[in-house]
Amino acid sequence: MQDQVNILVVDDEPGIRTTLSAILEEEGYNVVVAEDGYKGIEAAKKTKFKIAFLDLKMPGINGVETFKRIKKISPNTIIFFTTAFFAEDLLKEAVKLGAQAILYKPLDIDLILKVIKEDLTKTKILVVDDEFAIREPLKGLLEDRGYKVTVAEDGHAAIEMAKKTHFDIMFIDVEMPGIDGLQTLEEIKKVDPKTKVVVMTGHDVENLTEKAISRGATTCIPKPIDDMDELLQLLQTIKEGLVRTNILVVDDEFSTRETLKGVLEDRGYKVAAAEDGLTAIEMAKKTHFDVMFIDVVMPGIDGFKTLEGVKKVDPKTKLVMMTGHDIEDFVE
């Protein structure tokens, strides 16, 4: 239902405010108007806006400064600038700050309704890779299939973008200059825990997958991406929230741990492993596991203390205790 979508219109021209707000309200959106940047900022403190239209040149405080302040209050608000002028410096700054688009006056109402619909319905993807030859073709392929795609050439840029815009899915290369993909993943998860992250690597996927999942990634895939159909199926799975049951196997014995992991993976489960209780608790802080298999007897903290620690971090995880000893010795 569109009537739950709040839109802010900030413009010093009464005619623009009245016309745009009337059309948006007819489309079922909830619209708040403000005649200058200061009032727009105050409105953002009171109401959570999905989208804001800001006039670029206004008396008092211009659109770019208004943008900066609204983004501090509501980082996920999607912002469009409107302008009747070509102010090159302001336009460059607006794009650099992460404006969604710049719309020129007189406003094309059909275009405005189209961009609103796209931003509310399209899955937003960020592709993070320092290689142009990987980044741009992947962007093009995803755009051709209806996704809204942005690119970043390094981890720092991706983190800054995540502070300003919510991305549904990110593809992050592991090996990048500056901060690598796993460090980028950790920072992204701090900024926006709801973003699903797919880690990409040109090296050993199997060894990297466990590390990536333990830091909050959804999965790890090889690059270059040769099987586009498989990638699209993965995206559909993530979009629909049909990611496989996520299991953690906690056991200090390598043979037990890896055998159980392999058996579960063969049956279609998504499985990570931890060799002790402390590692399991740390992993549970970063990733939700639907089920955990925990060995009772382990060095460091035993299975029951691990159980308590995991339940404090993630009460929804279902826990299965395992032991090679007499179970009655452990049941009170």
Image (cartoon, helix red, strand yellow):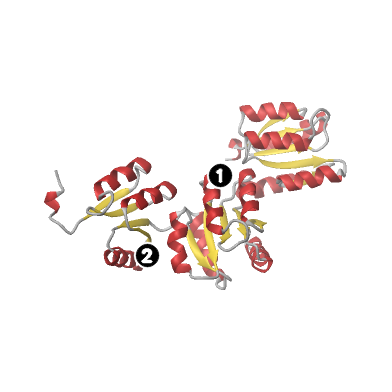
Image check: 261 left or right of 99? left
Could you tell me which residue is drawn at 75 percent across and 30 percent down? 37
Q: Nearer the viewer, mark 1 or mark 2?
A: 1
Q: Is residue 319 above or below residue 47?
A: below
Q: Is residue 55 above or below residue 307?
A: above
The residue under label 1 is: 191
Q: Identity of the amino acid at label 2? A: Gly
Q: Identity of the amino acid at label 1? A: Val
- x and y percentages locating residue 128 in the rendered image: 62, 58
- Judged from the image, the secondary structure of the residue bearing numbered disc 1 is helix
Per the model, the C-alpha gap separating discs 1 and 2 is: 31 Å
Query: Which quadrant of the structure image shows residue 227?
Result: bottom right
Could you tell me which residue is drawn at 36 percent across and 52 percent down? 279
Quadrant into which the N terminus falls: top right
Q: 321 and 269: which one is in front?
A: 321
Q: How many residues crowd around disc 2 within 10 Å: few (fewer than 14), some, or many (20 or more)? A: few
- x and y percentages locating residue 80 in the rendered image: 73, 42
- x and y percentages locating residue 236 in the rendered image: 52, 59
- x and y percentages locating residue 126 in the rendered image: 62, 55
The residue under label 2 is: 268
State whether residue 21 appears in this view: no
**Mark 1–mark 2 CB contact (< 8 Å):** no
Disc number at residue 305? Answer: none
- Judged from the image, the secondary structure of the residue bearing numbered disc 2 is loop
Q: 54 and 285: which one is in front?
A: 285
- Mark earlier in primary sequence (1, 2): 1
